[in-house]
Amino acid sequence: MASIIEGYLGKRVDGTKSRMPARLDRWQSWSGLILGLFIVGHMFFTSSILLGQKAMYLESKLFEGSFFLDTPQPILVSISAMIVLILFVIHAALAMRKFPYKWKEYKVLKTHAFSLGHTDTILWMVQALTGFVMFFLGSVHLWMMISIPDKIGPYASADRIYSDHMGWLYTLLMAAVLLHAVVGLYRLSVKWGIGVGSVPREGRRRNKKLMWIALAFFAVMGYSALATYWVSGYHHRDQYGERYRPPSTPLTAHTGDPS
Ligand code: HEM
């Protein structure tokens, strides 16, 4: 906490310039990079439902360790989700240092963004807003993944989305997450000069174009997956709680409990 305060003030107790702001900034970038890449992977993993229920089932068992354990263990999903939650909280705490706390600061930022038409400042504001939304909605989702990791699968997830009404939360969370992750990765590429090349202005423009393409791609894939779970949950509503069993898996198969 003391280091966050020192990082915020930019000065040591003796009044000399602190290196802490730069260090905290680096931590914020690294935690953001890891979370951003996690989200890219996550979107592909949950979208396995587009390949069919069996594909999603096998993939959920993979995360429970089916590739090295005889009996898959949902606790492995809890542990991963706990690590993501810790990273998520650290990243949010570091980002909060830069929020405009006073009305005057906010007005300056808004003028910079809109009156001067500074797109990167607008993108920063989008990140601050989506980060705020994600903190609440993402925490609810992560807590579920930590506490009921055994209830992940083609039927269990579809039941949660349709019958438990989580689909509405996911609709909002997905918009915030995709914007936040894609804009965040673009901002990192500019900050660290990744893929910018020898003409920075052109490189930035190219990366921004890639950012919009990635956003459109993940939005189409993510919302299609969500809609698939939703429709499946609707058809499964009278068998709520029943777990999926892949057609070729005998009751005694070593893939563990069906979900
Ligand atoms: C290790 C941690 C995580 C696990 C195991 C996990 C797992 C899942 C699963 C299984 C679903 C399908 C629906 C369901 O079963 O409820 C899902 C959906 C979703 N998750 Fe996560 N999640 C994790 C972290 C996150 C984080 C950090 C975010 C963003 C803050 C996030 C955002 C979403 C969104 C927006 C959806 C709905 C869209 C979709 O169906 O792809 N998840 N997640």
Image (tube, rainbow, N blue to C red):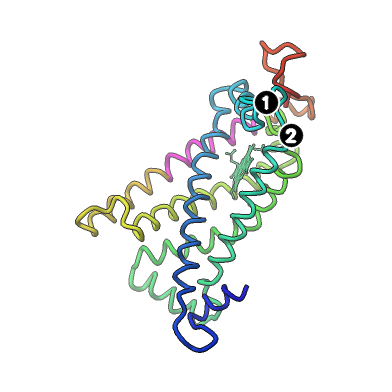
Looking at the rendering, the stretch of residues picked out in magenta corresponds to 215-231
The residue indicated by pointer 1 is: 69
Q: Secondary structure at mark 1?
A: loop
Question: Taking 41 as reference, is 105 above or below it?
Answer: below
Residue located 76% across and 44% down the image: 147
Q: Magenta includes 223?
A: yes
Q: Earlier in the sequence, mark 2 or mark 1?
A: 1
Q: CA distance from mark 2 to mark 1?
A: 19 Å
**Residue 245 image point, x, y percent:** 71, 18
Q: Amino acid at mark 1?
A: Leu
Question: Taking 68 as reference, is 111 above or below it?
Answer: below
Residue located 67% across and 12% down the image: 247
**Foreground residue among 219 and 77:** 77
Q: Amino acid at mark 2?
A: Lys
Q: Secondary structure at mark 2?
A: loop
Q: Residue furthest left?
A: 199
Q: Is residue 201 left or right of residue 66?
A: left
- Label 2: how many Cα within 10 Å (few below 14, some 14–19, many 20+): many
Q: Magenta includes 105?
A: no
Question: Taking 224 as reference, is 258 above or below it?
Answer: above
**Foreground residue among 68 and 100:** 68
Q: Is mark 2 within 8 Å of ligand 1?
A: yes
Q: Is mark 1 within 8 Å of ligand 1?
A: no
The residue indicated by pointer 2 is: 151
**Residue 46 image point, x, y percent:** 58, 35
Quarter of the figure with the C terminus: top right
Q: Residue furthest bottom?
A: 14
Verify CB contact (< 8 Å) between mark 2 and mark 1.
no
Residue located 48% across and 80% down the image: 10
